[in-house]
Image: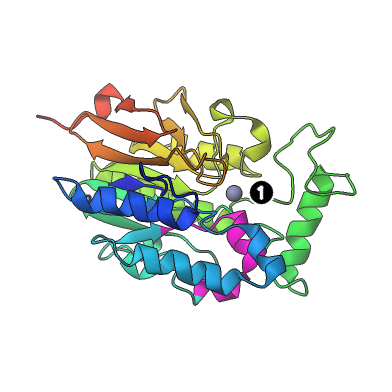
Amino acid sequence: MVTRSTNPKSRSPSPRSRRAGAIEHWNKESSTPCCVLQLGDVIDGYNAQYRASEKALERVMTTFQTLKVPVHHTWGNHEFYNFSRDYLTHSKLNSKFLQDQIAHHPETVPSENYYAYHFVPFPKFRFILLDAYDMSVLGVDQSSPKYQQCLKMLKEHNPNAELNSPQGLSEPQFVQFNGGFSQEQLNWLNEVLTFSDKNQEKVVIVSHLPIFPEALNSVCLAWNYRDALAVIWSHKCVVCFFAGHTHDGGYSEDPFGVHHVNLEGVIETAPSSQAFGTVHVYPDRMVLRGEGRVPDRIMNYKKENAFPR
Ligand SMILES: [Zn+2]
């Protein structure tokens, strides 16, 4: 399993070359990765003002096409600076067709109201991709009730004229460049985790926005990160939570033994460096082998969670 893109040892400064380098690396791995997780902000928001959004996306997707394994895409704020949610739903950044279904458990089927799904790359190991901009003012039609609801929620927590500013906020994550999870999505997450618990699976969650405060500066957290943590902590199956968004990266293990890893972003990676990693999954731990700015990490599962040998 692999995470996020970027720069190889080549000295090319372009993000496209960085991605190509990561892909070359993964294509050459002796044991082929089962999939790639793309953690969002894959194209820069600045493309929008130059009317270069579609061209930028096309370049990125062309590079991904050379990968020999499936790519799971999350959507970040930079995607929404370039495209509407409706556009993304019909674009190549929608990887929901890669989802798995759990037979006879309709409650584990995600709704079309948010972009989230789950998949099983190998037995007893489930990945859940969450939509951290399910509740957001980004990418939503401003005439829709959902936009009005989200704007109201944002303004209730953020009285600043500039809604991207966390200045003076007691909950600094309530800024426009973040978003949150609807109750509908959290209920769905709860159902999938209930199934995974019963089925003795391990679960890795993937989201553009992080949810654990000690992993980083709280200005980057999902609006209602506490609600997401409450769901996860009420189950024993979750072992790891991967997020993007922070650009500088971060890591911490929460009190319930869930590893929260925020991957370093390509956007603020020097041209001479790189920022991607490969995760190796073992019966009792996951090992992240980082490249460039991404450090190596060993993530042991909670003892009761290790697979019997
Ligand atoms: Zn972001």
Q: Quadrant of residue 82?
A: bottom right
Q: Is residue 132 magenta?
A: no
**Which is the main secondary structure of the residues drawn in magenta?**
helix
Question: Can you give x and y, in whole percent of width and height, for residue 63 in the image?
Answer: 38, 64
Give the SS element for disc 1.
loop
Q: Amino acid at mark 1?
A: Asn
x 25%, y 43%: residue: 201
x 42%, y 50%: residue: 18
Q: Which residues are magenta?
A: 73-89
Taking depth in this image into account, of 167 and 106 the one nearest to the observer is: 167
Q: How many numbered marks does the figure carry?
A: 1
Q: Is residue 87 magenta?
A: yes
Taking depth in this image into account, of 270 and 218 the one nearest to the observer is: 270
Q: Quadrant of residue 104?
A: bottom left
Left or right relative to 183: residue 1: left
Q: Is residue 236 above or below residue 8?
A: above
x 64%, y 59%: residue: 45
Left or right relative to 279: residue 214: right
The reply to whether the residue tagged 1 has its Cβ within 8 angstroms of ligand 1 is no
Question: Can you give x and y, in whole percent of width and height, for residue 157 in the image?
Answer: 80, 43
User: Badge 1 is on which residue?
Assistant: 178
Q: Is residue 69 above or below residue 167?
A: below
Taking depth in this image into account, of 198 and 1 the one nearest to the observer is: 1
Question: Can you give x and y, in whole percent of width and height, for residue 227 in the image?
Answer: 58, 41
